[in-house]
Image (cartoon, rainbow, N blue to C red):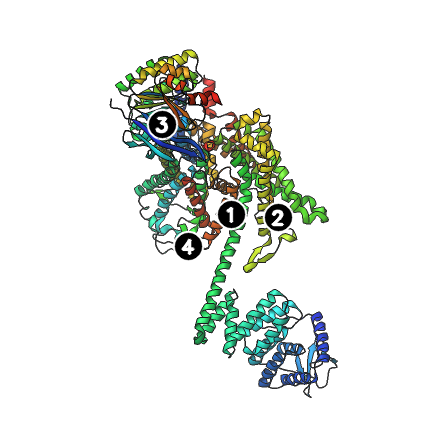
Amino acid sequence: MIGRRLYLDGVSVIFDGFRALNNLALVVEPGEMRAVIGPNGAGKTTMMDVITGKTRPTTGVVTFGDLDLTRMDEASIANLGIGRKFQKPTVFDALTVFENLELALKAPRGPVPCLRWLLPAPGRARIEEVMTETGLTERAYDRAGILSHGQKQWLEIGMLMMQEPDLMLVDEPVAGMTDAETEHTAKLLARIAGRHSVVVVEHDLEFVRALGCKVTVLSEGTVLSEGSIDHVQNDPRVVEVYLGR
Amino acid sequence: MGRAPARPIRTVMKRILLLLILLAASALPAHAQDAFVSALSGLGGNFNAQAEATARLGSLGDARALPALRALSEGRLLRTADGTLLIREGSGLVDAATGAPVAAPDPEPQRISINNRVRAALRGALGQLQILSTDPAERLAAAEAVFRTRSADNIPLLETALGRETVPRIKDQLALALAASRLVSPDRAAKLAGIAALGEGSSAEARSLLLEARAANADLTEQIDGAIASIDRRLAVRRVAETAFQGLSLGSVLLLAALGLAVTFGVMGVINMAHGEFVMLGAYTTVIVQDLLRDVPALQPWSLPLAVPAAFLVTAAAGALMERGLIRHLYGRPLETLLMTFGVGMMIQQAVRLIFGAQNREVISPPWMQGTLLLPFDIPVTANRLWILCFSLVVFGLIVAAIRFTRFGLEMRAVTQRRPIAAAMGIRTGRVDALTFAFGSGIAGIAGVALSQIDNVSPNLGTGYIIDSFLVVVFGGVGSLAGTLIAAFGLGVINKMLEPWAGAVLAKVFVLVAVMIFIQRRPRGLFPQKGRAAEA
Amino acid sequence: MSATTLEPGVSRARLGLRAAMIAAVAILAAFPILNQLPQDSVFHVSDFLVSVSGKWICYAILALSLDLAWGYAGILSLGHGAFFALGGYCMGMHLMRLIGPRGVYGHPVLPDFMVFLGYQELPWYWLGFNHFAFAMLMVLLVPGFLALVLGWLCFRSRITGVYLSIITQAMTYALMLAFFRNDMGFGGNNGFTDFKELLGMPLNTGTARAALFYASLVTLVAAYLLCRWMTGTKYGRVLTAIRDAENRVRFLGYDTTSHKLFAFVVSAMLAGLAGALYVPQVGIINPGEFSPGNSIEAVIWVAVGGRGTLVGAALGAFSVNGLKTWLTSAAPDLWLFVLGALFVAVTLFLPKGLIGLMQGRGK
């Protein structure tokens, strides 16, 4: 797979005078896994919003390969191969697990192709494979609305996998999970990591340590520190931000 | 033939006139008396002599000539065998020169007849003389008459009259007549003065006078064109000002109708389709208050001001009831709220229809709200529209103050912005919700009091306002009271500006379409609430 | 087609519902035939019932179209009456052209109201309406085009929820004001009436009534099948997903604007068709059809029947209108109270409507 490189430079987002992002720079190489950490309000979610086209940056460059993401809408960016899992799990409650995954399956997205859609055998196999990986096979024909919190998270990660994105943005995948669920999620992400670039936003430092990847620390909308988990944990500025206040 | 200037003269007026004549006669120097008497005798001569005498009497400016001239024009002037002129006053006769009653002479005096030439001269002369009358209405009519007959001979008389006149409206009319008379004077300087004076006015009459004079005075074209242009400017300004007032007036109605919604929908986010029915309830409360005060004459003129708090209380209670009983179960489900409140509106409307009947109810305007006023630039405004305009601004000010400076306003803002935190700080959010909704509904009721003055009070009064109100609130920016204010007046003025060339209905359609397109371009309105909180 | 397998209980309820549906259509289909029976027969169906149920069928098509937009795509249109009325006006224009020289003024081409208003010739937008096929095309295209423009503007700007509802309501209100004007060329206040014939059939005969009745019934069944097919495909599931979490659908790479637009336009066309079938049966169309109240009433049919289920929408149209027909003659003053109370009761106590009530009992 020839991946593309995510490149952000000089990105600022100003809401009503408040700088949610301030001259942010970030590069994620193809196939790389990256953890982004930072205190509340550091701009992690806003950064995701900028990459996925939900928020337009006030200034700055955001490219994926040679494509300018600031000029595209959410759907086009998603079709480029950038997938996103939200902080709050959002699956389609009225649809079954199977149907949720089927919607995410890579296929033509227009109304007419959808009307004429027949699930091909490889597609069905892929869905079943993802259900196995996420441990949702038994719940295939249950409506997503009745899943537990953890299962919803996995379903959403599964939907992300169905999209076969080049880059996955995962926002707080283990928030509100039990320890066992957290462990399962870490394994799931680790399995995915080889195939896609992944950016994980997380609070939980233990979880980030378990991922074992390069870490970027955000604070007040800008990059405070970058490097291995040990490197950033010993960075005095990081210590000050996390503990000094 | 033009309009006959003959007006019915009241007896009282006649007495006063006679008195004045006697006073004036005793005060006048002898030669003036002679001039009057000798001119008067001409009225008994042939048509030529009559016309000359009439014109002379008119320019003499002697008020004693008035009864005789009037009598002549009305066919009541009589000539005895010896040439004395008498006036028939009811059943009796008076001497035309002295005003003293006289016995009926023998042989029977003859009625003096006149022709059209004399009639024309009489109109001018009567106008000249009436200008000096003590009755303002008569003076005004005379000034208009002289304006129509305009003649250079009138200039001195008009100058005198203008010097004495104190009533502004008559003064303006006299100035116009003077300028018009100067325009036809042979003297170039007088003409120029007339043109300049007319150019300072702003009436369509002055404009047509100038256009007329332009054809006759080739040498003055430049000055006349300048004067016409300045009139046109002033007329344009007046038209704009008129449109602006009508627009602001419509805007004030929109504002009143929308303000309650700006609170319930804008601040709380509750979509209340029964809002129009609350406005209607306010209007009916006005009717009820008026009916209750029917037997208390002292309070009757105050029924409208008393209806304001009454309507507020009635609709606020209805609002609180609706919020606690129904709406609160549907928080977070705006579409269901919309349908449910629509149903409530329907029931309120039907209830009012059954109780009060489907026909319009009459609301009496207090005297101070009736009539028409003239604003600067001669803009005519009806008093009730002006009152409603002021009232809407006062209500707006009170709402802003209530939200900004009271404890209730603070709690209301706290609850709508961060409900859980507000609750954690000990604010009883349910109570605040109910009060806020009651507050917004009460404002709708107040709007109903004002609207009862300009709209038909019928059960479907509110239906017409609901869509407009929503568009105003959304156009201005949901949650922004200032936006609502500007949107209401803006839409009102735009609507009235479009009306002259599009017609009332099409103008409204245009405004609706324009607002719809605007909302599509800027979904958060003119004054969007900013920040991340606004992103849903 | 669908990968969904159903729980046995639900599927039994569905089967029962389907049987009831087929029975209902069969009974309706028998109405014009039973109408031919002698008056004293127990099975005689009165002229009134035939004509009124013909109207209800048109309302049911409107309800289906509204349910497609609201129940499935989450677009609460408070202006569907406008699409219905536009379809009706297109049909009305055709019927007016067919009157020909039989009008009061006897003009060979111009309808009476145009002669009355001093028109010298037919306005350009009236051309072609003398052809049935063209008129039918317009019945679909005019509402479809309006929906396309309005939907494109709204969905592209991400106007949703109550804002969209208010805009659609303002649209129908603006159209109503516009159609009230005489110089629009649509008969102003009085609209169109005094129709004579359609496709060679004189309109005031029992044959024509039966023919229109069957045309409406066939259209209702076809519309139901179309909606059922649409909502049963992946497209239908995308619509449901958009209704529940539009943003999330965007992040899956679906251009939600085009999906919603597609549903909205199809829905508007169905509404137009319903209006076109309605007008020859009631014999009149006037700007009152655009009144916002009509559109909201249609919404309550869907809500009463059960939004998001096609059968529910049709059921709601029949039951609310049946109640209306009965009450407006039995206790006219009560009707608006009952309708208002229906709004309140359905939103507060019956969010899934009558269908939800039945399914709840079936389980």
Q: Nearer the viewer, mark 1 or mark 4?
A: 1
B199 to the left or right of A195: right
Q: Nearer the viewer, mark 3 or mark 4?
A: 3
Q: Determine the CA span between mark 3 and mark 4.
A: 58 Å
Q: In the rendered image, which residue does mark 2 sit on? A: B362
Disc 2 is attached to a residue of which chain? B
Q: Position of residue B374 (x, y in %)?
A: 58, 58
Q: In the rendered image, which residue does mark 4 sit on? A: C116
Q: Is residue B33 above or below residue B485?
A: below
Q: In the rendered image, which residue does mark 1 sit on? A: B489
Type of amino acid under label 3: Phe
Identify the residue at the far top of this view. A180
For the residues tagged 2 and 4, is the chain the same?
Answer: no
For the residues tagged 2 and 3, is the chain the same?
Answer: no
Q: Front-most of B345 and B150?
A: B150
Task: Choose top left, top right, bottom left or bottom right for residue B290.
Answer: top right
Q: For mark 3, give the secondary structure.
A: helix
Q: Position of residue B122 (x, y in %)?
A: 59, 78
Does any portion of residue C11 appear in the rendered image?
A: no
A103 to the left or right of B436: left
Q: For mark 1, give the secondary structure.
A: helix
**CB atoms of marks 2 and 3 within 8 Å:** no
